[in-house]
């Protein structure tokens, strides 16, 4: 994967009204919003239930902005092909959700899609060190997955730093670090300083309905 030093903002659509998102994304400026973050929840790995590959495929028809698919589901190996068919920018699975993370990551990569591995707040950063060579992106959850509107956990910054240092030490120069949960204009710079280059923004992006303006402002604050 090509190394990118640019800060990317992935707007989490579950922070808005999913029933009208098809028409809403048409107003998103692709020069501001880099990615559409798709939180897939199955009601098992996390308590909540959102949407599946059908919804993602339909949404993709309404915007040129690349999709950032985050699978919060048990045994992603059972349904991964359906998500691959949506042709997203990246598909991220959870380390805790499968006994076969390497197998799933390799399958995603073979289809020409970026493969991401995510860890929950209670999972040590070191848990994914041995499999980072099979991933293009490491996603650090800075809140418990499946519960919208939580506050950012400061301990996540240490995790980001550990993963950043491991990536640099081992020469995985193409790997990106993403952070998801509670990111806003006040703490985005701390996340970027720790090593994150892909920021998931939910309520902070949709505040007052000013998506494009909010995202642009977050980029300015994160790049300072």
Image (tube, rainbow, N blue to C red):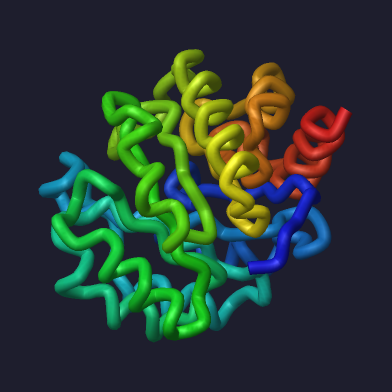
The reply, left or right, for residue 202 in relation to residue 116 is: right
Is 137 in front, or is 219?
137
Q: Residue furthest left?
A: 44
* Quarter in which the N terminus is drawn: bottom right
Q: Position of residue 219 (x, y in %)?
A: 80, 39
Q: Position of residue 157 (x, y in %)?
A: 54, 21
The reply, left or right, for residue 14 in relation to residue 24 is: left
The reply, left or right, for residue 42 in relation to residue 108 is: left
Q: Residue furthest top?
A: 154
Q: Position of residue 6 (x, y in %)?
A: 79, 50
Q: Residue sitting at 73 percent across and 24 percent down?
A: 189
Is 26 in front, or is 188?
188
The reply, left or right, for residue 93 in relation to residue 168 is: left
Q: Residue sitting at 68 percent across and 20 percent down?
A: 190
* Quarter in which the C terminus is drawn: top right
Q: Quadrant of residue 213?
A: top right
Q: Residue sitting at 19 percent across and 42 percent down?
A: 46
193 versus 99 height, above or below: above
Q: Quadrant of residue 209?
A: top right
């Amino acid at each position: 994967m090509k190394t990118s030093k640019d800060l990317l903002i992935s707007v989490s659509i579950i922070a808005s009204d999913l029933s009208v998102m098809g028409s809403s994304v048409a107003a998103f400026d692709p020069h501001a919003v880099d990615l559409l973050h798709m939180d897939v929840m199955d009601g098992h790995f996390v308590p909540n239930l959102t949407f599946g590959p059908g919804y993602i495929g339909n949404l993709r028809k309404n915007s040129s902005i690349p999709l950032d698919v985050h699978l919060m589901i048990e045994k992603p190996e059972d349904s991964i092909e359906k998500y691959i068919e949506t042709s997203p920018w990246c598909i991220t699975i959870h380390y805790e959700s499968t006994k076969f993370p390497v197998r799933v990551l390799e399958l995603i990569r073979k289809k020409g899609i970026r493969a991401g591995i995510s860890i929950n707040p209670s999972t040590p950063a070191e848990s994914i060190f041995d499999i980072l060579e099979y991933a293009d992106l490491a996603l650090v959850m800075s809140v418990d997955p499946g519960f919208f509107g939580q506050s950012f956990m400061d301990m996540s910054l240490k995790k980001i730093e550990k993963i950043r240092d491991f990536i640099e030490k081992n020469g995985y120069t193409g790997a990106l670090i993403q952070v998801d949960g509670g990111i806003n204009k006040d703490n985005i710079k701390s996340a970027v300083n720790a090593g994150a280059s892909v920021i998931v923004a939910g309520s902070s992006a949709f505040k007052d309905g000013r998506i494009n303006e909010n995202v642009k402002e977050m980029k300015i604050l994160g790049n300072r």
